[in-house]
Amino acid sequence: MFIAILQHTPVWVWGLLTGLIALGLWQTRDREMTMVRVTVLPLVLIALSLSGVFSAFGHFPVALGGWAAGVGAALAIGRQLVSVRGAHWSGQAGRLHVPGSWLPLVLIVGLFCIKYFAGAGLAMHPALATDTTFAGLCSLAYGTFSGLFLARAMQLRGLARPALAAQVA
């Protein structure tokens, strides 16, 4: 059955996975980032994960609650889990130095896997769209993974906040 799922997966999905892996591998390198770049990817992933919940489960309250709980939990405890050791703000360059990390790759591939397996499950068993356990757990996972990205971005933005506040004063 697993082979059949893979065989019926559209070719563009594998291209998307390749691109996402490349994006994740790119984040394993040290880099200098503007505040905009630090912020954009997490916001895109939050929007895409919420869109994934809506497209799979509609306005099912359990799904929306699961997603919100995942984001909330990730923001509450995620800062310790996704701390970026060695990151620092360079006031002269106006950029953050962010050391390479494998965590973004893990989170990106994790989100892809959730979307893929939820889609496969719904394609084989459409009734799962109204199953509270399936909808709640998938949505919780969507929210948690994208929320961890947001927690990481908030932590990075926090490194620059004191320096930027000092410049304004």
Image (cartoon, grey):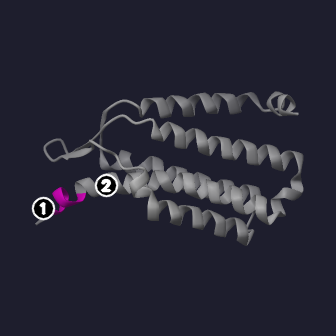
State left or right for residue 19 relative to residue 64.
left
Quadrant hosting residue 9: top right
Residue 152 in picture, x, y percent from top left = 40, 52
Residue located 37% across and 57% down the image: 154
Say which of 82 and 165 sits in front: 82
First in sequence, mark 1 or 2: give its number. 2
Residue 44 in picture, x, y percent from top left = 51, 50
Q: Amino acid at mark 2?
A: Arg
The residues colored magenta run: 161-166
Residue located 70% across and 55% down the image: 138
Residue 35 in the image: above or below residue 50: above
Q: Main secondary structure of the magenta part?
A: helix
Name the mark on residue 166: 1
Quadrant hosting residue 17: top right
Residue 129 in picture, x, y percent from top left = 82, 59
Residue 9 in the image: above or below residue 138: above
Q: Secondary structure at mark 2?
A: helix
State left or right for residue 117 relative to residue 89.
right
Q: Secondary structure at mark 1?
A: helix
- Which residue occupies the extreme bottom position in the image? 61
Quadrant hosting residue 97: top left
Residue located 43% across and 52% down the image: 81
Residue located 84% across and 31% down the image: 8
